[in-house]
Amino acid sequence: MKNGWQTKKLGEVLQKTETINPMQSPETEFDYIDVSSVSNATFQIAETQHLKGRDAPSRARRLVKTNDVLFATVRPTLQRIAIVPEHLDNQVCSTGYFVLRPKPEVDYRFVFYSLFTEDFMGQMENLQKGASYPAVTDSEVRAQLIPIPPLPEQQRIVGILDEAFEGIATAKANTEKNLQNARALFDSHLNAVFTQCGDGWVEAKLKDLTELITCGVAKRPEYVLEGIPFLSAKNVKNGQVVWSGYRFVSEETHRALTKYNKPQLGDILYTRVGSYGEAAIIDREVEFSIFVSLTLIKPKSVLLNAFLKHYLNSSTVKQLAAASINGVGVGNLNVGAVREFPIHLPSVTEQRTIVAALDDLREKTQCLESIYQQKLAALDELKKSLLHQAFTGAL
């Protein structure tokens, strides 16, 4: 550590903060900062609730002041961290935040940046407890060690980080926009194929072009540690079958489940719950069964499976699927509705040409997406590197 730097517990460089009970002043109005109010993308307080004291939630207890640093202790690794702006001075935040109010000899932005370091976040990950809502305590946050240089050095470091992070944020926003554009390019072309029909295309219902459209078993089977894979909707993503993360059933159970609807190489799996409306081709010759969250589609020879996959993944059909959802809460895409889906069908030869063009475009856009995702990862690594240098005296 550089000369003049000290290592202190975070609690040693903080002032005491105040608590308040808004319900004691029922008519007094205030702005409430809930845990969900802080964006972990911009690290700012994105929204607040304007309440009267009588309507205050039980967790509305912590008084905040301008330049306080808020750190959400519930799911701490999500990094809901923000600085209180001037217009929220003397307002109230949830007890789900630890409020950091640095002493005069410590720059509040220096403390703010310290909460993003890998060392601090690693400690939070190790200390958090609870399955559904992992959390750390205020005392655990206070006990964390922080390197403290003299105030002028803190301010110099903060100035460098402010400028660097502003540039990184701009680069990240531009890259994310480029990533969205790459995805939109393919989606737009895909949708155009199925909305601008060519000469000689015939309209039919999906049920007339398939041998079978059915869903998997509705009753959850008895699982075993080893056996036949049992796939569900989570095993279809981004137009591919995900051959991992599934449960197993016995061979006897598998035979019973697939007596009349056995999934085979080249068939289509189509999600019908949760992230419904995603299609993938079975690309492996392997024995497996499916849960009710998947629809199994066996196209006839006049309908190429790859053409059908692209059709089902187009935004036009996704909208059709969304309009066909049944149920409240986690709805499901009824198999009967899928059978009635309309499709315009060209000849098999033209289908092959269309599929080849779509696959080529998809490959190119995925290459672009990969480049942009790598750039985003590099920007995140740059932030981590700058923070490491800043808090080890190497900046």
Image (tube, grey):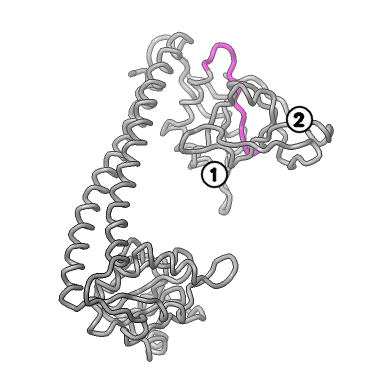
Quarter residue 328 falls in: bottom right
The residue at 31%/52% (across/down) is 183
In the picture, the quarter occupied by the C terminus is top left
User: Residue 361, image x and y in percent?
Assistant: 20, 57
The residue at 37%/84% (across/down) is 207
Whether residue 390 appears in magenta in the rendering, the answer is no
User: Residue 232, image x and y in percent?
Assistant: 42, 71
Quarter residue 58 falls in: top right
First in residue order: circle 1 vs circle 2: 2
The residue at 57%/71% (across/down) is 327
Mark 1, residue position: 75
43, 277: nearer the viewer: 277
User: Residue 160, image x and y in percent?
Assistant: 37, 18
Q: What secondary structure is found at the residue carrying circle 1?
A: loop
Please state if 98 lies on the left or on the right of 248 as rendered.
right
Please state if 286 lies on the left or on the right of 131 as rendered.
left
Q: Residues within 10 Å of mark 1 (few under 14, many from 20)?
A: some
Query: Over which residues does the magenta segment extend?
Result: 95-107
Mark 2, residue position: 20
Q: What secondary structure is found at the residue carrying circle 2?
A: loop
The residue at 38%/83% (across/down) is 213
For the image, the number of numbered tags is 2
Cβ–Cβ under 8 Å for marks 1 and 2: no
Q: Nearer the viewer, mark 1 or mark 2?
A: 2
